[in-house]
Amino acid sequence: MSELLVEMTGISKSFPGVLALEDARFDLLPGEVHALVGENGAGKSTLMKILAGIYKRDAGSIQIKGRDEEVPSPHAAQSLGISIIHQELNLMYHLTVAQNIFIGREPRRGFLLDERALNAKAQQLFDDLHLNLDPRTRVGSLAVAQQQMVEIAKALSYNSAVLIMDEPTAALTDTEIEELFRIIRHLRDQGKGIVHISHRLEELKQISNRITVMRDGRYIATVNTAEAEIQQIISMMVGRTVFEATPELPEKRDPTVVLEVKGLNRGRQVQDISFQLHRGEILGIAGLVGAGRTEVMRAIFAADRPESGEITINGKPAAIRSPSDAVRHGIAYLSEDRKRYGLALGMDVEVNTVLASLRRFANSFGWIRTGATRKTALEHVQALAIKTPGIAQRVKNLSGGNQQKVVLAKWLTADTDVLIFDEPTRGIDVGAKSEIYRLLNDLAKQGKSIIMISSELPEVLRMSHRILVMCEGRITGELSAAEATQERIMTLATQRESVAAA
Amino acid sequence: MKLTRITSLAAGTMTLALVVSACSGSATTAPAASAAAASAQASSAGGAASAYVPPTDAGAAKGKTIAIISKGEQHQFWQAVKKGALDEAAKLGVTATYQGPATESEVDKQLTMLQTALSNNPAAVCFAALDSKAAGALLAQAQASKIPVVGFDSGVDSTIPVTTVATDNTAAAAVAADHMASLIGNAGTVGVIVHDQTSQTGITRRDGFLAQMAAKYPNIKVLPPQYGAGDAVKSADIAKAMMTANPDLKGFFGANEGSIKGVLNALKETGNEGKIVAIGYDSGQQQIDAITSGVEAGAITQNPIGIGSKCVDAAVDAINGKALPQKIDTGFSWFDKTNINNPEIQAVLYK
Amino acid sequence: MQTTTLLARSRVQSILRGDSIQRLLALGALLLLLAFFSAVVPHFASTNNYIDILTATAVNGVLATGVTFVIITGGIDLSVGTGMTFTSVVMGIVAVNLGLPLPLGLLAALAAGALVGSINGALIAKAKLPPFIATLGMLYVTLGMAQVISDVHPIYFDQQPAFQGFFMSKPIVGIPNIVWVMLGGAAIAWILLNKTILGRYTFALGSNEEATRLSGVNVDRWKIIIYAVDGLFIGLAGIVIASRMNSAQPGLGMGYELDAIAAAVIGGTSLSGGEGSVVGTIIGAFLISTLRIGLSVAGIPDQWKSVITGLVVIGAVWLDILRRRSRA
């Protein structure tokens, strides 16, 4: 075995009120992909942020290539050859690709910037990665996957020996993940050490050499991927055995059409969309990122006004001109970006729970009956098993899974018939995921109609009664639960009218 | 050529136009060219106001506090008022406090100042209201607490003040109009630049000027007044625009120090110094220099130091229970190149 | 080879869809306005009047150029107007009250501006005050300090005839030097913004401050520098306004900040940061003074001038929003 690139031992770190890491450790070899897994809040990101100089550790030692190092700042980490790609992309959308990559290290001629050299250097980097990207493009005009590539190119431009990727595939489609993995393997073969933080365990099987499991801020175990079973890793992560069997679907579906969409259009992303949603049904919407799935749902919800199209609710035409119209017609939309669109993060669980139905809790003078709101919030906290110290807890202090449950509680309180979930399990750990699945099934059994957008094919296959597949703003096919397979979905999802160079 | 004519005209009208405060003891002469306005001025100066004799000692008021709330503090004019008031207070042996808001639009701040002053229970209050109606409740409160109120400058539009110490701006602006008329030969187009269209001084000076022109000089066309916020640069841009729009413009009246400074800047920037008659208001270094060099034909000066000192005098009298005339006129003067160095003019100018 | 053509094409595309559209819009509006006034308002179309418009733009143009930097970072500077007053008074004190040579007075004005800017920057970057609050505070501090150090007396530059003599003289095509000073300042600002790392970080900060910080850029230091550059322009504006009045007036300055911000916004600078240009800002400043002077020459009452100026600001930003929406 070659010498360790990184060795972290006895790392502890506490934030006000929370012990985030306790005697954690981690090591990395050159030329390997080392996966770091654990539930949300297990301390993976914190540990890696310490390695990247973003947080300061309270205790423990870090050795880089056998030498003790302090790593006091991101800058210091970079000069030690450590780069991190954050879960949330950190790009300057108004700047070009090349400007983003070399921010802080711009080539200069005297006092002035050398834009030509800048673009040439970026082009060189892309050539090395066999990436087709124009260094002069504004980052804001790129797709998420391309932005991710920019982040990777930026990290590599520091000549990093160690590359940390925090959930790099969360926003990517399968083909894009393939492209990412190609690049990761390429880098691994060059002898770089890559840390891969992910929730997608299937993925780790493909790409990683070793897997380290963390739980509650502590190191649990490191296994060789080749010898590891997914089920075994999951039980190490959650500290218990998770029942992972496919939940049974209701045998018989109610044929009542709750929502019907006809000829919906808006720009390139929503083209002539028509479908029906039945009572008690979970309708999965599959497709690559950028296929227009979110855009269709936003158009139905009137978050963006459609250019044309009809929406019928319970057989009656509905004029939905704004999200508040949509809610009044019994449609709820749970955004994939919970923090931005789903929650008032600075407010407590109770307020968030009743936020969409405040009118019901207020008397005619606008006075809120706090007794009723408290009762409702408590009921939902219990029913959904929201892990919170109390209903007065600020939502921003909850984990991703529990935040998602609060969003759900909000719409259950609003008592809407149609619930549109956009990537309901994004950024949620395995344990919480299966709970969300169970909740969706329960809701469907109670007669709610659910539309679920998901980029994780196993999730779509497992949850949906029926699956619509989209590509480039059009619906390219419909599959029943029985006939759907990963291959068929992917075929439909790539049925493009024009094929862009990839 | 033109310049000398203007100067001689100015010299000719000077003696006629000089109107000095009766209180200052100088001779009062009504200008022939402005019978209506100036005779009103003369009568008020020679009537009730002349009866007012300032106290020579504080009497029972000695050591008591007079709160003075003015309309501003930054402007040179208000600095002169302040000096007059504080000097007079020191002379008489009373305590005077002086306060004013930063700009003449801050009615609310002025009310807060008045409220605070009243809470300290002064022996008398001198008040130059930015908005008399807005101050109504506080004035009633002063009356109820038996604190005499002396109005000054634009005064207080109410029956509560025991007297008002002020310049008759309407009459003064009429005198400016008379001078303008004779300087341009009673015919032609004239522009007016005013500091604002909401304050009492802005309104009375503008209307005094316009009314006199309308009543007396049918051949003079006065352009619609423009407003430059008393900002010398903004007023200059406005003056230039008026000159552009009216190539035949013969004269400018600037209704306060900032406005006339703007006119002077505009004349300088366009090379029209001496070609267009400029008449101003108040004083200040730039205006004094322009008048001395003949670029500015002349200006109306109030007597800010006199306003300040008479304020304190009236307050002392009010504390001592002496009867006061309804108005105490502090007078105004026309000054130009020929009389600017006279001691009675120098006494009221500020730099 | 292919890369170069690709690059060239994308440059054309980026010009077509980038901020330049807003600049073209503003420029179009300016030309339209000039054409309209020239056609409709008697006496408007004259060389002298055009020069008057240029002269009237000088002060606001310089201030707006400075404030453009901080607005691109996503900040704001409310202290530019009174800061300008402060710098002109400092210049008066150095060049008149202390009787030092004029160039020292000019340097003192620039230094005072840089000081005001640095304090703003330090309050924002180090003390973590929101820019609105920090610069609002400095608005009052600079106004008060201008009055304190001048003892609320205007300072006249009569003893320094070279001052107004230089700045208001018209050696080139009858345009006073203050206009060339404004354009020169704008040219320097353009180079700073587009060709130096200072400009790069200005845009980067406004686009995504956290990302810039994580990229190893010393964000706090650059913020202070950017606000100091803004301050230098405040100092330059202090010189320009003093030269027009041949004096430093300690009571002036309130309201100038809003004109400066309006000019930047009309010129396409986004108050949410990351976008903006000096060219646009200068066009915006010209638009405002053209409007004011055009309406004055036309004899429109003052109150309507304010209404129309306000509508133009709203209209400009609304057009920008419409453009973005249609692009998205």
Image (spheres, coloured by chain):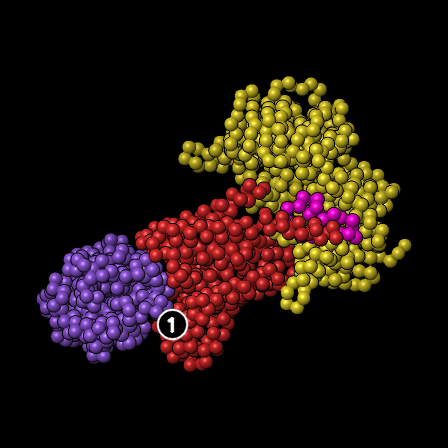
Specify whether residue A147 is painted magenta: yes
Residue C294 percent coordinates (x, y): 37, 55
> Which colour is chain C painted?
red
In which quarter of the view is residue C95 placed? Answer: bottom left
> Which colour is chain B painted?
purple
Quarter of the picture holding the C terminus of chain A: top right
Above or below, C159 against A140 in this view is below
Above or below, B261 against A147 in this view is below
Q: Which chain is yellow?
A: A
Give amino acid for label 1.
Ser
Q: Is residue A143 left or right of residue C75?
A: right
Residue density around tag 1, few if under 14, some if 14–19, many if 20 or more, within 10 Å: many
Residue C225 percent coordinates (x, y): 57, 65
Q: For this rendering, which residue is in front, B78 or B281?
A: B281
Q: For this rendering, which residue is in front, B154 or A377?
A: B154
Specify whether residue A250 is painted magenta: no
Q: Residue at x 66, y 49 (%)?
A: C9
* Whether residue A466 is visible: yes
Residue picked out by circle 1:
C247
Residue A116 percent coordinates (x, y): 69, 59
Q: Chain of mark 1?
A: C
* Whether residue A418 is visible: no
In which quarter of the view is residue A367 placed? Answer: top left
Count of numbered badges drawn on the protein? 1
Residue A92 percent coordinates (x, y): 63, 52
Q: For this rendering, which residue is in front, A144 or B85?
A: A144
In which quarter of the view is residue B321 placed? Answer: bottom left
Residue numbers of the magenta segment: A126-152
Q: Secondary structure at mark 1?
A: strand
